[in-house]
Image (spheres, coloured by chain):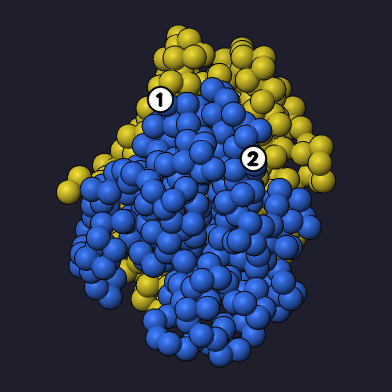
Amino acid sequence: MASPTLPFLEPIENLRAQIRELEHASAGSKPSAALVKTRRVLASTIDSVFSSLTPYQRCQVARHPDRPYTLDYVKALFSEFTELHGDRRFADDPAVIAGFAVFDGDPVAVVGHQKGRDTTAKLYRNFGMPRPEGYRKALRVMELAGRYRRPVISFIDTPGAYPGIDAEERGQAEAIAFNLMEMARLPVPIIVVVTGEGGSGGALGLGVGDRILMLEHAVYSVISPEGCAAILWKDQARAEDAARALRLTAKDLKELGVTDEILPEPGGGAHMDPQAMAKTVEAAVRRNLKQLRRVRPDTLVVRRYKKYREMGMVTVR
Amino acid sequence: MTAQTEGVPKGLWIKCDACREILYHREVSANLDVCPRCGYHFRIGAARRLDLLFDNQRYKKFFGRIQSADPLNFVDSSPYRDRLKTYNRKYSGSDGVVVAQGEIEKQGAVVAAMEFGFMGGSMGSAVGEKITRAIERCLDRKLPLIVVSASGGARMQEGILSLMQMAKIAAGLARMRDRRIAYISVLTDPTTGGVTASYAMLGDVNIAEPGALIGFAGPRVIEQTIRQKLPEGFQRSEFLLEHGMLDLVVPRQELKATVARCLKFFR
């Protein structure tokens, strides 16, 4: 919890620290009156801060350094996770994880972006920004899932695909494009969970599916608010305006027909109670998987096509 | 997205962007908007592109009435709605792409030529819808599809819906593969962002014009990320060919004949 606090979350963090102290003081005995009162203040503070979050603040919650990452959900939702590595072409990309796991007793494939928690891990995971190898590794595992009729659960949490020389040289665009096409015709259920940042094409490269679930404070956008502000407002400091204009919150995406379901977060965000969050995700995955397992593979692919076919809004003059 | 305009500017004399040579306008135009001195390929619009590809410059256009709406009520320095109006007036409704059917060396084909002048050829719902309809037309009539890309990427003003056009078109292309309907991608200057990361890289054959900027991230974004200057020729057609991302780099004069030869293979 040594991470720098976002200004608008400071009152919450301060109260949490107070509560920890009070809990420590009254350990083993009945909660003190002060503790009970502070807990009540915390609840109402969370309510007031989170009921008026601006879209840009929501982006910051989605990027919160304590937010649960893909491997945290993997640990909570699945058993027997067997991580697989490498794209069989060039390298293993630690910004993407992929592998086999067991959900409710049945084998499934899991893929997702992975961010690092501390500085070393952040660098190792390249801040969750995949190179082409990451997309190709994930696809390799998804194709195995397709062949052995195992559903795919994909966790989305990335600032974007890595914009570097090596990534371009090895075909970042082709890697993402190819995933979009192959995921569109994978003959098994694909459930996508946007847990944090849905960073444009870098997110979509693992994000085509039958059900798109989004955590309440997750965001998903064609471009980061900072990037959009720099281009359209010529001023990166206008990110607040850009975030509002882009309509990138879970609620926005639901209204725009891109997200199927919003998964409510614990008070104050997923990082306040990762276990409760994982339970919610687990229940949603279970429910959706149960429905999708009943659908024949070819019907699944036809419905997936129709789902994306309908996205967008045009006028016919 | 670059602010450069496409095509050879009007006027009797023009200066080549690459070799700085002063050229006679009609000479460049007769040379398919390629500099006769250094071979630099000027950007050209969708109409000119269709004229160059189809036999006798004859083709039937489709879906010209489809235009982007303003799903987000997007406003930056000016409302997106107003921008659309201006561009629609200037390009008579060819929002980002023009789809047409005709013959290429006597072989029927559908061509979707992107209009870079229309908001940097950016891909919003209209581009997504028109290319998807082009794909569906090809599936229905068993016709090959050629998409000529020229785009800065997804259109920010339509937010997430622009991004989803990548998935929508890629899903259509998956159907084409399954049904063995050919798709040729022609990449021209510039092809970047979400367009490259979807249909532009998914051709059964990927052909580029010489010297075109092609990439996922824009050069400026990469420079800012890695904090160093990019090597000469980085993200140009020849660089991509060398790295195995393209099948061919073909000068504009040979493009039609090359496309026609490929179509023969797929017939």
Residue A163 in sight here: no
Label 1's element?
helix
Q: Colour of chain B?
A: blue
Q: Is residue B231 left or right of residue A317?
A: right
Residue pointed to by mark 1: B140
Q: Chain ID for label 1?
A: B
Instruction: Looking at this view, name the residue that lies furthest to the left.
Output: A317
Query: Can residue A171 be seen in the rendering of this structure?
Result: yes
Q: What amino acid is labelled 2 in the image?
A: Cys
The spot of residue A241 in percent (x, y) is 32, 69
Vertical side of B78 occupied by A93: above or below: above
Given residues B45 and A218, the one toward you in this image is: B45
Chain letter, colour yellow in render: A
Q: CA distance from mark 1 to mark 2?
A: 21 Å
Q: Which residue is mark 2?
A: B262
Q: Quadrant of the C terminus of chain B?
A: top right
Asked if B112 appears above or below B223 in the picture, the reply is: above
Horizontal side of A314 relative to B244 (left or right) equals left
Task: Name the residue: 65% across, 73% down.
Answer: B39
Q: Earlier in the sequence, mark 1 or mark 2?
A: 1
Residue type at mark 1 is Asp
The residue that appears at 28% across and 75% down in the rendered structure is B77
Give x and y (percent) for residue A121: 72, 54
